[in-house]
Image (cartoon, rainbow, N blue to C red):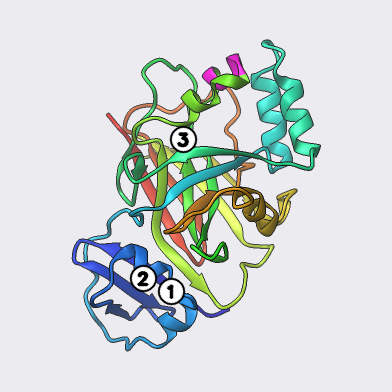
Amino acid sequence: MNYYKIYRVDSGIQIENASGQLTPVISENWDNCINHDHLFQFCEKQSFTSNPRASIQTPIDSQEIWAAGVTYLRSKVARMEESKESGGDTFYDKVYDAERPEIFYKGNKLRAIGQHGLVRIRKDSAWNVPEPELTLFINRQNQIAGYLIGNDMSSRDIEGENPLYLPQAKVYDASAGIGPCLLVTDKPLAPETIISMCIFRAQQEVFQGDTTISQMKRSHTELKDYLTREMSFPQGAYLMTGTCIVPDPPFTLQANDEIHIQIEPIGTLIQTVHP
């Protein structure tokens, strides 16, 4: 598989090829650059040299961030466990097998946090976890044009209390981790692509888990088609595709925890919980 990585940096935009060489993109803003009709071919035409890497910024401008839930069996089981007392467990059981997927709004540039940024946990929640997710970039033509790493920060006790509280459990300041770059490939990611997550506390590993995207019940195209069925995205959108890496209770994030989410060849998204 051939690929390029597009970075939003403090000086504008940089594209990196598979050999690690970089080139700046001149006279292009983020929205226009990533929405080229043939993005891979656009990257392919660039001239790459050993340019220094600029400071990486969050790879988002006018894009909305959406997320799909209960796309992995492990996610279904975890959601049923956390909502059993409220009687909401049947909702997750049904949506896993339903024709229509669960899709919800996660945020925008205002809520997004990039590489080495500070994500937050809610002050009114006692059970908070990161959720590592392969994230699709859907361009303005409603095509899957690239991939990112997503961190769907979640307050599990709030969502478990009542499924209608999902927006509060999922959408708040610094709750949408995304980055470190936009990966553009000449063909879709392989089903055996691994998603892994490690959480470190005081430099000690306190959680590790991994899965492959082949464990998803729904296809990327299916999720994309439902998101774009009645909505247009003039500058494109990001769609987190769900997770099956769910820390077992009673694990909960704490201030200063460091979260490492790796999906190759995208890279590793590293974020810290706000102190």
Q: Answer with left or right where residue 102 lies relative to residue 4.
A: right
Q: Answer with left or right where residue 201 lies relative to residue 191.
A: left
Residue 153 tag number: 3
| Residue 244 at x, y percent in the picture | 64, 42
Cα distance, mark 2 to mark 3?
A: 28 Å
| Residue 83 at x, y percent in the picture | 66, 18
Q: Nearer the viewer, residue 135 or 236?
A: 236
CB atoms at circles 2 and 1 under 8 Å apart? Answer: yes
| Residue 111 at x, y percent in the picture | 35, 39
In the displayed structure, would residue 48 be above or below residue 9? Answer: below
CB atoms at circles 2 and 3 under 8 Å apart? Answer: no
Identify which amino acid the numbered label 2 is placed on: Cys
Could you tell me which residue is drawn at 51 percent across and 38 percent down?
105
Callout 1: few (<14), some (14-19), or many (20+) C-alpha neighbours within 10 Å? some
Could you tell me which residue is drawn at 28 percent across and 80 percent down?
23
CB atoms at circles 3 and 1 under 8 Å apart? Answer: no
Q: Answer with left or right where residue 95 lies relative to residue 36.
A: right
Cα distance, mark 2 to mark 1?
A: 6 Å
Residue 33 tag number: 2
Cα distance, mark 3 to mark 1?
A: 30 Å
Helix, strand or loop under label 3 = loop
What residue did someone put label 1 on? 36
Helix, strand or loop under label 1 = loop
The magenta region covers 158-162
Q: Nearer the viewer, residue 128 or 61?
A: 61
Identify which amino acid the numbered label 3 is placed on: Met
